[in-house]
Amino acid sequence: MMMTNFKMDRQTYKDLNIFSDARGAEAIFSLFKSTRTVGGKEKIQDMMEQPSSDIRLLNGRKSAIKYFHDHQLHLQIKSEQLDLISYYLKFNKVLSRNNMLDSLVDFISKKTSNDYYIVTKGLEFLISLLKYLSRFIAEQDSAKVPEYLKNKLEEVERILNLDSLKTARGFQEKKMKFYQVSKLDHCFRGKDKEELLSLVSLVYEFDAFETIAALVGKREFCFPEYSENEDMEVELLGFAHPFIDHPVKNDIFLNQQENMVLLTGSNMAGKSSLLKSLGLAVYLSHLGFPVPATAMKTSIFNGLLTTINLPDQIEEGLSHYYAEVKRVKAAASSLLENDRMFIIFDELFRGTNVKDAYDASLLIVSELAAIRNSAFFISTHLVELASPLKQLGHISFRYLDTFFEGEKPVFTYRLKEGVSEERLGMYFIHKEGIVDIIRAVPRQKVSSSV
């Protein structure tokens, strides 16, 4: 199935902490660390490095993962055995001979060597795997297996029915004669090597499907639904970040008529976490993976670009503000190259003075609002932007609710319609007693000069 590229750059991977975080925060990839095999984990990493805009691939992969979930499939395989099989197939030693006399000579001369042990153990585990896969396929109801997974199972079955593999399945893998070992090794590391490596790769993929499927129950993820409507739409219900304990879940609706959200809220209200949660749902849905939400229906996008944790570029001599400008330019360029993008900006132009930030934000947001086939989610402290932007008519305004209970702020993390009116900046200044500390510093008299 042909891959269709989904544009996603290094900064976006860092913002969403997909693979690693310099600050030591847990990576999203760690959600999938419970694969049975190393190869299964590598398969998941390969998928996560290649998000796609191909709806056939996304629906196909989703259907395979959902089948594993719905039927509670658990592969009866062991990592160490798969690892040894892979090692054996790639074993860079001379093939065993394919006739009785030469195989006897090999047996006598090598039977106590480590090389012979690798060959015999590799064959033992491989034959055991072949028998298990044959049973596994027979246990599946072909009428219920989705087409994407059925194609993979049929490929497994095709390989299993190769003459040498059919013969091997008739052997008792722990009681093979020396000439059987020699004959099978000659085939398996010879003419059938690539087919067997493909078989092992498919097993790793099934291991990946099983691991991903487990998230639906363990983490209360859902399977996304993909819209084929011409108009852009995103409906995300009960979404939250998977690493937040007991999260407050929120809903988001975007469509061609309201394709931009301006998000406001006080400091510590949870804006950045919400934006990361949203970006993560969009990203995972474009892998064909389950997403951290109650339900999701989305159009297929051609890329995701976020600006949430933008670092200073001191080594390039760039200020934070200029780094922001370059990031906005990158977003504009991606919109020029791709007809449907999902763009997330957290605190647009925070690196400059209030006047420039206001003017620049108003200009950029107004221009982006004219692009109707992409989705934009932009957070800001500049609530004053709301008034002129409301005149554009198709921007949705949301805020994260915060209120005071007595003298203490309460953060609800609940997304509401409208514009935030809370100002907590001075609250934290007073709470930390900064002014009192400054006033307690001894003042030194300055002598006047004559």
Image (cartoon, rainbow, N blue to C red):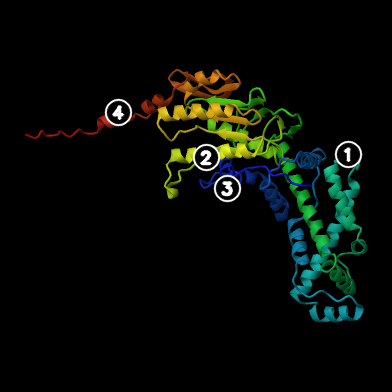
> Compared with residue 83, is residue 275 higher up or lower down, i.e. above or below?
above
For marks 4 and 2 on the same chain, the one whose residue lies earlier in the sequence: 2
For the residue labelled by badge 4, is the local secondary structure a helix, a strand or a loop? Answer: helix
| 148 displayed left or right of 318 | right
> Compared with residue 427, is residue 350 higher up or lower down, i.e. above or below?
below
Q: CA distance from mark 2 to mark 1?
A: 47 Å
Residue type beneath disc 1: Lys
For marks 3 and 2 on the same chain, the one whose residue lies earlier in the sequence: 3
Residue type beneath disc 4: Asp
Residue drawn where x is 71% and y is 32% of the image: 299
For the residue labelled by badge 3, is the local secondary structure a helix, a strand or a loop? Answer: loop
Report which quarter residue 178 is drawn in.
Answer: bottom right
Whether residue 125 is visible: no
Residue assigned mark 1: 144
Q: Which mark is residue 327?
A: 2
Residue 377 percent across, percent down from the top left: 58, 30
Q: Which mark is residue 436?
A: 4
Residue drawn where x is 60% and y is 47% of the image: 19
Closest to the observer, 330 or 442: 330
For marks 3 and 1 on the same chain, the one whose residue lies earlier in the sequence: 3
Residue drawn where x is 10% and y is 33% of the image: 448
In front: mark 1 or mark 4? 1
> Compared with residue 236, is residue 407 higher up or lower down, i.e. above or below?
above
Residue type beneath disc 3: Ser
Q: CA distance from mark 1 to mark 4?
A: 71 Å
- Report crowding for label 2: few under 14, some 14 to 19, many 20 or more residues within 10 A (C-alpha): some
